[in-house]
Amino acid sequence: MNYTVFFRRIRESRLFWVLTAWAVILGFNALFIPEFFRINIQDGHLYGNLIDVLNNGAPLMLVALGMTLVIATGGVDLSVGAVMAISAAMGAVLINPAPGDKLVSNEILTRNATNTPLAIIVLATLAAGTLCGLWNGLLVSRAKIQPLVATLILMVAGRGIAQLITNGQIITIYYTPYFWFGNGYILGLPVSIYIVTAVAIIAWVGVRKTPIGLFIEAVGINPKATYYSGISAKNVQLLAYTFSGFCSALAGLILSSYVHSADGNNNGLNYELDAILAVVMGGTMLSGGRFSLLASVLGAMVIWTFTLSMYTLGVPANALLAGRAVLVLLVILLYSDRRLVKRRSVRADTQPKSAVITPDENRDLPRP
Amino acid sequence: MADSQSLITVRGISKAFPGVVALERVDFTLRKGEIHALMGENGAGKSTLIKILTGVEQPDTGSIELEHTLIRIRSPQHAQQLGISTVYQEINLCTNISVAENIMLGHEPRRFGGIHWKKLNEMARQALLRLGIELDVTQPLGMYSIAIQQMVAITRALEIASAKVLILDEPTSSLDANETARLFAVMRALKQAGIGIVFVTHFLDQVYEIVDRVTILRNGSFVGSYDIADLPRVELVAKMLGRVVGELQALAQDKARGERQPDERRLIEAAGLGLSGMLEPLDLAINVGEVLGIAGLLGSGRSELASLLFGLTSPDSGTLLIDGQSVTRFSPQESIKRGVALCPEDRKAEGIVGDLSIRENIILGLQGRYGWFKFINRQKQDEIAEKYIKLLGIRTPSPDQLVKNLSGGNQQKVILARWLVTQPRLLILDEPTRGIDVGAKAEIQKLVLELVKDGMSIVFISSELEEVVRISDRIVVLRDRAKVADYDHAVSDRTLIQTMAGEA
Amino acid sequence: MTQRLKLSVMRHGPLLTTITIFLMAYIIGAQLYPAMQRPQAFFNLFINNGFLLIIGIGMTFVILTGGIDLSVGGVLALTTAASAALLKIGFSAAFVIPLMLVMGTAIGLGLGSIIHFFKVQPFIVTLMGLFFARGLAYIISLTSVTITDPFYKYLALTPIYMPFFEKAYIYIPTLVGPLLLLVAIYLAYFTRFGRIMYALGNNEQSAGLMGFPVGRTKIMVYGFNGFCSALAGIVFSISLLAGYGQFATGVELDVIAAVVMGGTLLTGGVGSVIGTLFGILIEGTIISILQYNGTLSSWWTRICVGALTLIFIGIQSGFARRKKEL
């Protein structure tokens, strides 16, 4: 066995850094907050911080799945948080148990009842988010607006739309079957874990057992050569953004179910950065190209392990923002450290195009 | 060469990049008040020499003297300070700020701690007037044509850097005749003022119109410097292509193509196909199982023809028939459906998808044709990849190697494989053998001939005349973006070179 | 001559559109709600949106270089929280205000340096800056801190009556935005720094080859934006007499929208701070109309801002296309 090759392969694996980060955090916890690992069983359900990582992290994992595909095409989706708020608002409004023409009293509103069948609520919620994704996709692929700007528009307007749907109210949900998505258990494990697993498997099959994954990566790496190979980037982008919208919608559903409320201003707040962070930790370059869905999910898990560990240590939730920012900085520096090594090649590539470099001159250098 | 008139003297400059020797012991002298053409095909080392003169690259060996003082050019900024300025084909100015700013910014006059706009505009106007150009300098540069932008770039070089040496890198390639004449007037004025001009161009007519001396490079080596008056056109072209006239004749005798009678069936028929500014309307016919060679110097319209045939650009005149059917929508996707494939000239930017594996690169074309729903499964992918790696002799430890880690020749073979998998009927090869080693070149030529035997038609574009003559059934010659001749394979090299040089 | 006029209209088209839309919006508002006809309603636009104008100016500079800065809201909130906390433990305003400005500038310079030296996309670096600054603000205090400093109170509560207009007034901090605008115009049009900023946004590589200090200019622009954010934070804390990490959430989007509405291209190189002023006035007018209406709710502002941003991007690409054809 050639050890250097072995280790290089490990280091180059997309899972390496994210697993290392996880191991470091868990190692820290093992030393300083051993109670983090305690898992209790109550009524046949598992409870404990590790289970919470999975359950609380589920929405982020979903968003990260969608974000992975978008980033792999060379774009970015900043609207994920707003889309989560829209889908949560959609669900909460449809649940509203007040029958159409009768006098609405507080007693009716807080009843454990619904005006709309649960199946339709779920479908409408998902449809709303998917439509948002489709809109982003159309702006990027057809109207040729830069992804950053296109999704920024929905990021601004989306929270307004969410408030429009709920009429500016923070709607508390009392309909218990709806809570199942965020709080239910199947065979001792939270329902949300099953949802994430299902979506991840479907997404994985969807991209790896069809040509779509290849197309996404090719578009992200070299759009020109991909076009020359007869593959249109348009539909690939459209699909990625639509899928991201769908994932955000599902995340919004789970989140609102978990917190029993829909709040246009705060549902899915800051999920954009967390999702981007999860994807980048998962080894997908922000410039697009190679991606790993599993690594992004693990990235989301690392973020939540970190968050919950800090909670356990008594760090207030809001102050954690700064900690996560430092984490982003570290990840950025980690990845650009590799670039620093290749700094000269980057510079060589910024020379004017007219000064043609013969193709072989720098064939061993990676794209900047 | 103890030339008292010399501005720049370059002696024995060599430069190697990983795997390639770009320049080998090149000498070059630029005198005061002369226009000196630097000529050679792609890969000859012109760009590397210019990069060394402008401080972008450092030479491995050799010396540079500026006005008899030994110098080291550290960076483009340093080159400017030394008085060596470059105007690139793609102009390096900012189109959103005014003409005056583009000329003066960096040395702008000030008043009350701010820019003195009135004076700045006046200074810029005067500077342009000295070159015989009058225009509204307050308008953004982008409002003006490329030609004017070039003049502005030259003016900046003279004003800011007080240039003694001016390098013009293909300045005329996007100019029309009037604009070129205007540029030449400026160049003559500068020459009178004692400035040395290095002029890179592919247009022979222009060389003979304005240049005093010419230096020819080929494959990184120095061929020679000549007074233009002593060098007939044919000699010039022959030197660039590295042929003694007459030698090609012998080669043509033992053509690799053998005695093959091409099919009479028409595959492609173009009538008056053209795109203004890129390619003059031309007629072209390609039969089934035929190799059509395209000969022409760089900038003659070779790649433009390829991109029209492949549908990368839409023509604005003429018709293109494939199999008797008229093409109405021009896009790579449509072309691929019709069985047309292109191996592009710029392998790195347009050909390979570097971060994908060989396997993925090979199946990309076929998968693109299949679309989203017909998936080539992993097993099939491996089969295809293995087959073509063996068939084309791609040297790699495994099909899962990233393409960016392969050598140029092997990358070219991967792109070839990508198209062969789709079994195209017309394969357009734009400089398929550029920058790859001799062995791989021969393999690719051999492959082309085998493909033709199986009934594929091939358009073979190459700046290596030997190759074109060797394998083509017919040869179309392009010059100055227009078709000038259509020869059969028995054409003599002398005729060919004369046609390319424009002396036929 | 007509050609020249046409060129000039094309060049200033987006700006003229913005001014026209502002005037139209204001006139329609004034027709619907006579209260908006009072001069004070106009001055209120400046009083209420002063901090937006300040950030908008900095943001315009950043966007002109082809970058983007999402950290402005965070730096603003951090400034309010930090200054409130410092004032509370007894530091004087004369010490706190300069300190805050230095802090904002330093954060901006830091972010700019990361962007330049590590070649990371601006949006991700500044998004990190946003979280970092807000997080710090929460570390300083998890709740809103009121400011009781007499100087701040004096600034907040002393109206300046406007000449020529009866009973129309503004406050001292309201003047900061317009004054900064003058400084910004001077910087953008009368200094080498400003012109290089424009050149940089058009073509960074060309600007480098023309011998301009690309990196330094870029970092300075982010530093300037950090300064503006801190300044906006001071103005903000004066007007609310409080400091809190949750102040001005989402303000970065409002500001970017205003910059875009002002005719600045998000790809860089084209635009002006004057345009941004009108972009902000449009936003302010929409908010005023919604307030005067009373039945239309606040969230319509966000939807309108989003829609207007989209429309303006459309207008811009329309102008860009027409320009090419000319």
Image (tube, coloured by chain):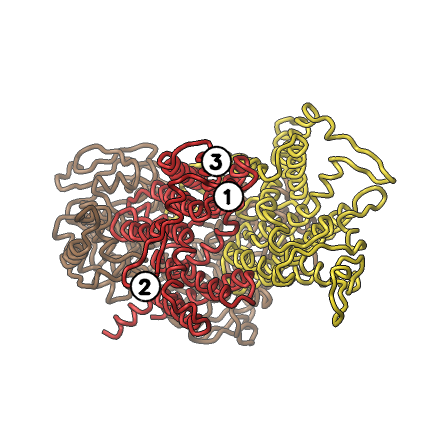
* Rendered residue at 76%/57% (across/down): A110
How far apart are the two marked residues, 1 and 2, measured between alpha carbons?
Answer: 42 Å
How far across and down, in percent of the image, does residue B308 sit? 46, 66
Nearer the observer: mark 1 or 3; the answer is 3
Residue of label 2: C166
Q: Colour of chain B?
A: brown
Q: Colour of chain A?
A: yellow
Question: Helix, strand, or loop for circle 1?
Answer: helix
Corner quadrant of residue C149: top left
* Rendered residue at 57%/35% (across/down): A323
Answer with mark 2 or mark 3, whichever residue precedes in sequence: 3
Residue of label 3: C85
Q: Tag count in the figure?
A: 3
Q: Residues within 10 Å of mark 1 (few under 14, many from 20)?
A: many
- If the image is split into quadrants, where does the N terminus of chain A sit? top right
Question: Helix, strand, or loop for circle 2?
Answer: loop
How far across and down, in percent of the image, does residue C309 sit? 47, 62
Q: Is residue B463 visible?
A: no
Nearer the observer: mark 1 or 2; the answer is 2
Residue type, label 1: Leu
Residue type, label 3: Ala
How far apart are the two marked residues, 1 and 3, measured between alpha carbons?
Answer: 20 Å
Query: Does residue C320 appear to the left or right of A180 in the view shown?
Result: left
> Which of these two is toward me, A273 or B121?
A273
Query: Does residue C205 appear to the left or right of B256 in the view shown?
Result: left
Nearer the observer: mark 2 or 3; the answer is 2
User: Looking at the image, which residue sits at the far top?
Assistant: A31
| Mark number, residue A172 | none
Q: Establish if C258 lies above or below C116.
A: below
Name the chain letter of the residue that bears numbered label 3. C
